[in-house]
Image (cartoon, rainbow, N blue to C red):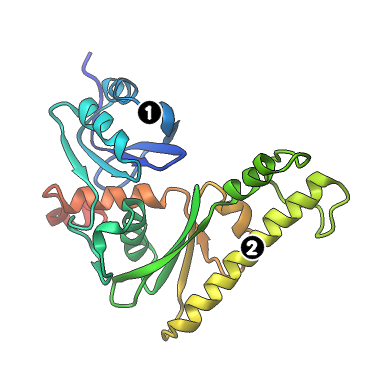
Amino acid sequence: MKKPATDFLLIDISNSFTKLAFASRSRIGRPSTIATPILTAERIARILHAHDAATVVASSVVPKKNREIKRAAGNRKVIWLTSQSRLNVRIDYPNPKTIGADRLANAVAVAKLNGTPAIVIDFGTAVTFDIVAPDNAYIGGVIAPGLEAMTNFLYDRTALLPRISLREPRSAIGKSTNQAMLAGAILGYRGLVREILQRITAEKSWKGKVRVVATGGYAKLIARKLPEVETVHENLTLEGLRLVGCMNSGLSALGEICGM
């Protein structure tokens, strides 16, 4: 029996987790997640064996895992998202090669799906803020410690503070160690996000509305009480990879079919 096939296998390799999804030229399928430390060519090959794709489109911030993608892809075309890729945004940045591929994917997606000017907040191992100007120029951003990294640091570096599961605190005043840590983590993190957004928008006083889009693991938790965030898009990075696949595989001429 012939296995089903599609246009792309999208792979976003971050420090903690790797997200994968098959995609047509116009939409992505249901993503799956693998812990990046256990990502191997064999695991990816099994995924491709069940549902093939003509092209693999990948972004990676973990270079040592790139060879696993190459091995699993075999004879399939592999498109690596870099600053040299064909994009729908131009890069106004002193050293484009130092921009994380996931950050470029987010910029590509937000420019197409939400419009500009825009700020993308990606809640991953680190939290990143990426800014796309009204003329579709990626102009830079901010990198801060991720929420989980901050709470794990307290657990690792103290004798009595526990590891906590992150959720909305009951109040700003904790009545237990866990509740006190939750208040510090969640409310403090919202304060960090709000202050950075305020400073960015003060420096760039563009006319019209600035689109603020959140993505990543803790986006819903943090953004739910941040009115500054217009929308949460869980798969923004994968959408950016889909668009990059279209633009760099000769499919962009198909226009609406590629969602361009």
Left or right: residue 76 compared with residue 64: left
Residue 190 has which mark? 2
Question: Callout 1: few (<14), some (14-19), or many (20+) C-alpha neighbours within 10 Å?
Answer: some
Residue at x 27%, y 55% (from the top left corner): 259
Establish if 190 lies above or below 75: below
- What amino acid does circle 2 point to? Arg
- What amino acid does circle 1 point to? Leu
Establish if 41 lies above or below 203: above
Helix, strand or loop status at disc 2 = helix
On the image, the x and y values in percent for residue 208 come to: 43, 83
Establish if 171 lies above or below 132: above
Residue furthest out toward the top = 1
Residue 39 has which mark? 1
Quadrant in the rendering for residue 228: bottom right
Q: Earlier in the sequence, mark 2 or mark 1?
A: 1
Q: Nearer the viewer, residue 192 or 150?
A: 150
Helix, strand or loop status at disc 1 = loop
